[in-house]
Structure formats: C-alpha cells, structure tokens
Amino acid sequence: MSAPSPFDLNPPSPSDRLLLESNLDAEERRVLLNHGTEAPFCGGLLSEKRPGLYACKLCGLPLFRGVTKFESGTGWPSFTEPYHPDHITGVRDTSNGMVRTETRCGRCDSHQGHVFTDGPPPSRARYCINSVSLSFVADDTPLPSPQADERRVVVRQPAPPEAVMLAWRGPDGRSADADALDLLGLILLGGKGARLYRPLIASGLAIAGWHHAWRLRQPGLFQLQAQPAAPADHARVERLLREAVAAVVRDGVGADELARAKGFLRGQLAIQRDGPVAIALQLNEAIAAGDWTLYPTQAERIASLTAENLQRAAARHLVDARLTVGHLVQDACAAEDA
C-alpha cells in the first residue's frame, strides 16, 4: 500500500464545481467535461521540457511529474506514471469500436486521456494525455495547499469539563468511505468492547470518550474525543487516540472487531426505524447529505463493508494534512480575560 496522498482528494462541491467549470473555454469543456480528444501534435504542452509538474486543468490536483514525461511520437504528452496512484483513476472505455482504459482526475473526475501498456520500462505504462486537460506548474512555483500539516487549537475556560478532540476532514456523506468511517468510530470508541475502552476509560485516564462521523453534503468531520480525568492527562489521552488511529492505518482491523461494530450499527438502525417519526428524521438526514437513497440502502451497504474498506478509508482520510487537534483546558485565569 502506497503512502496516502498529501492532497485533499474529496471532489469539489456542486457549487465549487460550477465555479471551476465557468473558467474553462469551449475546447477545455469539450475535452475535460465531454471526454473529447484534441488533435495530435497540436497541444501546447507537447514540447514542454522545463522541470515541474502537470496538474488537472479543472481542479488543480497534481497528476504527473515532469521527470516522468517522455517523447512517445504519438502527438500527445506522454508520461510513465502518475504523481500519486490515487491522483489518476482508470475507467473501461469501449467507445469508437475499441477497448481502452480512460484516465480521469482522481479528485474531480475530469477526462484526461488514456493509458496504454506500450510505454518504456520499467512500468511499460504510457499515459497519453491531452494538453488541454493539464496545467504546467514550474518547479519554482509553489502549489497552493490549504493544509500542509495538522492544526492545533487550545481553548481555555475557568470551569470544567476538559476535553481532547481529534477531528479529521472526511468525505462527503454520499461517499462509501463515510460508511467505513461510521464503523471505524465504533471499533475505536463504541462501547466497552471498543479498542480504546480499556486503555482510556477502564484505566481511569479519561472519564468518557466518544466518536462521531458527520454525514453532510459537503465533506464533514470524523471526530474522536475524550474527557481527561485530570489536567495532566491531556498529552497521554491525545497520544492514545493517535496511536489507535495509526494502528488501523498500519495494520487494519480484526474480523471480530468488524463483526461487533456491524452488529452494534444494525441495532442502531433498528431503533432509528421504529415508527414514522424516527423514519422521517433519518430520511431527512439522508436528503440533507445529498441522496435520499442513503437511507433505504444503509443496512446493505454496511453489511458489504470489509476490513480492507476500513483500512483504505483510514489511510485516505485520517492523515495529518486533514487533522485538527483541540484541547479544552480548565484555567482559573481565563475568567480574567472574559
């Protein structure tokens, strides 16, 4: 498994996508949005040789490094490998009487070109990409990055309670990863059988602990939170939460843990469907997340999840570049600043 991408791979929201698409000219729209192909030997990046990288024209995600570009003689910019495996997706394409693999941006799903197996060694891959689908970024030009590392905040108040929270920017509510994170939260902090119950709660280090995976139309948050038993325990609580997440990313989850979490969630779903009011509330939540079918299909989706799905979602979303750490600290002097 490759290291997770340092970039946010969640797709643009509908409103953001409309704004991005409004910046495209007619030829860019034809290729990026309607899966067109530019004429060979006409692209503006075909002879580009400066050090740098090539990013998606629509959303700006880095797709290829300049050092992987080579002259294929085909008339389109060609590359041996993507910037990161998750930055390019492959889709079976049977158009024009051929069977090919279309390449799309891993974030915004815009059309880039096709990948073939007649490239140079060692990969033998030839990513044949439309110039109009790419933007060249020279080495001396920094890429914009909304968050390069974890963020931290400390809030002081004169009275308890105290708390430690780790919150990662997660997927939008329609993503399959949202289901995986629901289960992962239960495995980590879902009752007495959870991984963190004994080292965190039963040990007396924390008074309580809980989790929440927000399912929203926009990317939400995956939260792990605990209430330390003593002010001096903040660092130890944070370390335990971090170590538990790192272990999932590294080693995954066990079959027994997954079965327990699924059983717990099945019980929750049964309660949430007990009566017309409960059903209406949950259906409204699914509509708010952007797809009413999330409600009737939830049980089947949860049942189909595997340990690999959970590990993949953790590796994709629970990384420092998506993390905010918060400490709510009791401080008698905080009253003087109010």
Image (cartoon, rainbow, N blue to C red):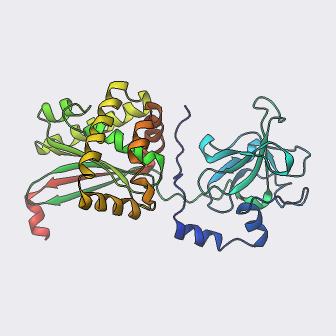
**Percent x, y for residue 157?**
13, 60
**Horizontal arrangement in the rendering, residue 251 relative to residue 68 (left or right):** left
In the foreground, 208 or 162: 208
Q: Does residue 97 lie above or below 2 as drawn?
A: below
Quarter of the image for the C terminus: give it: bottom left
Can you tell which quarter of the image residue 232 is in? Answer: top left
In the foreground, 74 or 91: 91
Quarter of the image for the N terminus: give it: top right
**Percent x, y for residue 274?**
23, 52
- The number of discs equals 0
**Horizontal arrangement in the rendering, residue 39 relative to residue 288 (left or right):** right
**Horizontal arrangement in the rendering, residue 139 relative to residue 16 (left or right):** right
Q: Which residue is drawn at 38% across and 34% down?
A: 246
Q: Residue at x 30, y 62 (%)?
A: 280
**Percent x, y for residue 213?**
34, 50
Q: Does residue 250 lie above or below 13 as drawn?
A: above
Q: Can residue 239 be seen in this view?
A: no
Q: Does residue 334 lie above or below 251 as drawn?
A: below
**Percent x, y for residue 292?**
43, 60
Q: Which residue is drawn at 69% across and 45% down?
A: 91
Q: Can residue 279 be seen in this view?
A: yes
Can you tell which quarter of the image residue 59 is in? Answer: bottom right
In the foreground, 106 or 267: 267
Find the residue positioned furthest to the front.
Answer: 275
Q: Residue at x 80, y 30 (%)?
A: 121
